[in-house]
Amino acid sequence: MKINKNNYFKIIVIIYVIINIINASDNVKLSNCGQARAEPTFKQSENGGQCQLPPPSIGTAALSLSAFNGGARCGQCYELTGPLGKTVVMVTDGCNSGEACTQKDLFNFIISNKDFDKIGNSSSYVNIYSLGYQEVSCGFLGNIKIKFGGSLGQNGKVDYSYYFTVSFSNFNVGIKQVQILGTGMVSYMRLKRSLGGFTWNQESGGSKLQFPATLVLTGVDGQIISYKFRQPPANIAIDMKKQFIPQVGLLSKFNQSEICGMGNVPEYIYEDSLTFGWIVSNSWRFNVFNLSSQDTDDNPTLGESVIKMDLAGNGGLAFTREGGFQTKYLESLKVMIKVLPPTNSLQCFFGASGIYVIPGPLGGDWQEISIPISVLKPQKVEYSLSFYNNQGQSITMWIDNIKWTFSSEAPPTPLIITDPTVTPPPLPQSILTAAATIAGLNSIGITSNKGGVANLVEGSSNDDDGNGAGGTGAGSNKVGKRVDGEDGDNFMGGDTAFSYYNDNSSNILLFSSKITLTFLLLSLIINILLL
């Protein structure tokens, strides 16, 4: 059967839309990979933590103070990668006690023992220093839930006129900002974040909040959802009948097939001092151990301090990294070293033992040695690196500038990844044109979202036909409809769909099984071919 050009584009659009919806309940990548630290805890945050979020269906995490950022990451989900696997957790709390919580160099995740043991072994170590992490969609089923609050009026009822709060739960993509437009307001006003919630106060001489009103949520990935409502009940979780649907394929900035592994080990193990995450307490059979010896011999290639160690016969200097480190991208190990008396019996190995002997003799003059990682026969994840005096005679060893070199394939894993906060690019015009010809496809609401945020700030329309709250810049194919009294939610007004997919259509597809969606896809393609 010959497929004409128009049908070809229709099929592409249908396949694209359904693939995005199928992936909506998965953990879609929303950022690059980064490296962080994780530690387990027996006691997780109670009562929703500082974010005051209901307990999710996945594990939760408390973030270090700077990473928590005053609650800006409340509800965001992260996939964590350790030596034994991966797990996804949602941020519900911050921590501010201890160096790990107050430092600003990297994210520190405090997670339950149960989640920690999915990626590591809490009975063997209490930190993973080379943790890989990546922001992902949470994969929750159902819609976003919304809860309203206000001040108590003289009649004992909640009054939203001068003070208005709103909080959300069960959202699949982190919420970057929330704006509101009440009846009579000339422009959208941005709500102030308060940990896991958002607050509006009447400004001096400003308008009171009157209904119907429209809330606009902006996700960290640039998605925009609007919600128009009449005066709502207070302190009751309400189904918004909408959900962020993370983008894959053409609209995704990130490669969904790319595997985010553990974070790269830092370049240096020792340079004047031990690099964060490395310890030497597992060394054995030594008499003198000085981590900051000044015996540099004024060598210009050395720093201010070196390690000096008197190793007894069969003694060893062990550098251990809790939680392990991946060896996939390690190419060589470079070390500045001198030994007295000279020796041909110094070994280097990963783990508990090995057979590689550093070529000698190593003597009383500083020299740089380079050891190919391949000769050390590494496992995918190692936990320690040792220098072993494989003889009965004692030696004194000075060592400095212990560092790794990496292969050219090593991916960059920054210490801190930033929220994507980007507007996905528009679909190719050929696909948009084809989409417009498919009967009923406009109800799914594919949109380029070009200039959407700017138009939201400037817009002031409150009508119910899909043209309000920011004009057409927020979505070229959005559909507005009346839902007064629908499912008993009589406080809801006209509903302007700024989300990438219209709420009802996306929910029907989102909660169908993948098998049903597959049959739907095949059915649509067959019907098009028969046209």
Image: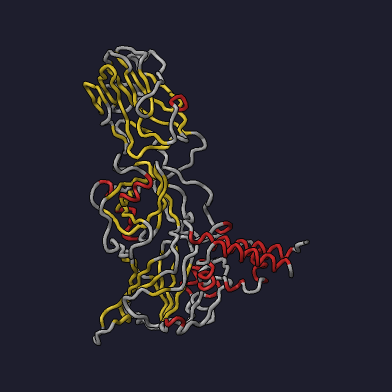
Number of numbered callouts drawn = 0
- Taking depth in this image into account, of 308 and 314 the one nearest to the observer is 314
Front in this rendered view, residue 420 or 242: 242
Q: Quadrant of the N terminus?
A: bottom right
From this view, report whether residue 87 is shown above or below residue 139.
Answer: above
Estimate the x, y position of residue 60 in percent, counting from the top left: 34, 56
Quadrant in the rendering for residue 232: bottom left
Question: Going 41% across and 42% down the picture, which residue do you hit?
Answer: 263
On screen, residue 465 versus residue 384, left or right, reads right
Where residue 387 appears, as percent x and y from the top left, is 34, 23
In front: 397, or 521? 521
How far across and down, in percent of the image, does residue 130 sit? 38, 41
Q: Quadrant of the C terminus?
A: bottom right
Residue at (46, 72) in percent of width and height: 457
* Residue 214 placement, left or right of 11: left
Residue 232 visible (yes or no): yes
Q: Along the line of sight, which residue is nearer the eye, 388 or 298?
A: 388
- Residue 145, horizontal then vertical, whole percent: 39, 70
For image coordinates 56% across by 62% down, the residue present is: 515
Q: Identify which residue is drawn at 30% across, 63% down.
A: 48
